[in-house]
Image (cartoon, rainbow, N blue to C red):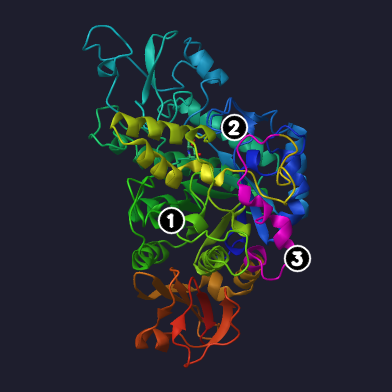
Amino acid sequence: MKTWWKEGIIYQIYPRSFQDSNGDGIGDINGIISRLDEIAELGTRAIWLSPVYKSPQTDNGYDISDYCAIDPIFGTMADMESLIKESKKRNIGIVMDLVINHTSDEHEWFQKSRRRIEPYTDYYIWHKGKNVVGKNPYDKKNFPNNWTSFFMEGAWEYDDIRGEYYLHLFHKKQPDLNYHNPLVLEEVKKILQFWLDKGVAGFRCDVINVLWKTSLADGKKSVMLTGLEHYKCQEGNHEILRQLRKEVLDKYSAIAEFECFTVGESVMVNLEETKLLSDEARRELNMAFYFDHLEVDRVFARFVPKKFLAKELLKRLTKWQQGLDWNALYLENHDQTRIVSHYGDDSGAGEHGSLWERSAKLMATLLFTLRGTPFVFQGQEIGMTNFDFTDLDDVKDIETHNLNRLMKKFCFPAALRWKWLRLSSRDNTRTPFQWDGSSGAGFSTAAPWLGINANYKQLNYAAQKDDPDSVLSYYKKMIALRSSSETLKYGDFKPLAATNSLLMFSREAAPAEPAFVAAFNFSRKRIKLNEDARVLLQGKIAASNIGRESWDTTNTHLDAWEALVLQTN
Ligand code: NOJ
């Protein structure tokens, strides 16, 4: 079925790093409003806004202390209302980040829950300790179970006031809500209604497949995460999503100008689990983010590197492209690293003719020729690279610091720890947006909350805006190509060929519609195409990241980091 959220692209904004308007070194809502024209020019249909709610900011806003208030560092509710209004004028919907697995421990509910004030007593997952080794509540052996958190710590914290432990699958300042208490879901429904009444277009749902804890028994021991089997994708979780859809979202869709939209972040999922979350007929989510395609060159989620193979990427893309009815397509977000530094080559960042430029454009070609809704993370459209920090002290992300502590515990040498942390740190995508070459990169007039990459002098929005050969112009071209083509939006995906560095696929719709073949060289070496590949690769140029104007049977090689899309009929 065709619908608005399948047609356009969704642009993700990480507010604290996007645009500062009041000179405090932190991005804010008025800063976003001042950049809406740039966002619209890209071809954006909706903005996914990372959290701007009131929060102590332990996890940069993913720890919410009031869902119906704006944190003063980002502005006021009036600013938020004007963002919704100004976006609407440009036909852009606002997608709020819905963080409902946990709140901040500074949320009123938690403060009352720890004091057993009704009706909040059972809003969180409280439990007595095991008391197996004396009475010391801080001894891990006494914790209610052996679960560990996504941030690589124990998942329980002892609360002196209540005299019990509470569960936190993330930071200890992010206590998990208790969905076995029906009042909690009622509160969540009110939050959704509050924002829908303000005119938002939908929600990106944070870690949405771990809400329901079926049991609190010990989990199977794992270096990364113990306890997962007790709460990942449980039937109770599906029931929560169905209720939210039926009782809130569908009701709004019936009266709103456009259908309310949801995309879930689903952690540690396989294809079958993702289908259950996002299959339209089940009426849960519209689509779900998964991580498989970004972990081709990693083990232990995204933490330990291994060799990248294009054929492995194609295998994984094929599985999801063909396995799901509709994909949430992304190559970057605020928890990942910059794609040009990850699967690409960031050498010569900001320079014409560099491998950086080619590989950044290759990534755009890939993103907009797959089937699904493309998400672009702020700065991706100008090819921003990973941070250039040389010291862990420059990194703010709590996950990076926890991982460092864990590796230290296992006696990993400092140089290796830093090497791996640099490859995985979430701060890689969180450095401030590089708007221009002035001091502060046009992001802020004050010292920024997180260091700006020194390459901003040559790699910035202003330098690319009017340059027809820039990465930014290429993003615009590719987005326009996708939006003008029914085949690229809705056609079938078929894998064609792959080697260690070559990847080829086709997109086809009805015979009367144009069909495409796309080929990518994920390496800095020129590669020779074999006979089979050459037979498949015929047609007229629809996109070329190196400015090719024609392609015929005399062409036998793909250049370094070349991406080529041909219309074959
Ligand atoms: C996923 C979010 O994307 C991430 O930034 C956050 O730390 C965790 N969920 C916890 O909310």
Residue under label 3: 466
SS for dot 1: loop
Q: Which residue is at 53% across, 15% downward?
A: 111
* Residue tagged 2: 190
Residue 18 in percent (x, y) is at: 67, 44
Considering only order in the chain, which callout, 2 or 1, is on the residue closer to the N terminus?
Answer: 2
Q: Answer yes or no: do the residues labelled 2 and 3 have beta carbons within 8 Å?
A: no
Magenta-highlighted residues: 447-475
Q: Is residue 285 above or below residue 80?
A: below
Q: Secondary structure at mark 3?
A: loop
Q: Nearer the viewer, residue 148 or 455?
A: 455
Labels 2, 3: front one: 3
Where residue 57 appears, as percent x and y from the top left, is 58, 28
Mark 2 CB near ligand 1 (8 Å cut): no
In the image, which disc is placed on residue 279? 1
Whether residue 197 is in magenta: the answer is no
Q: Which amino acid, by three-letter code, is at mark 2?
A: Lys
Task: Kindly identify the amino acid type of the residue bearing the numbered disc 1.
Answer: Asp
Q: CA distance from mark 2 to mark 3?
A: 45 Å
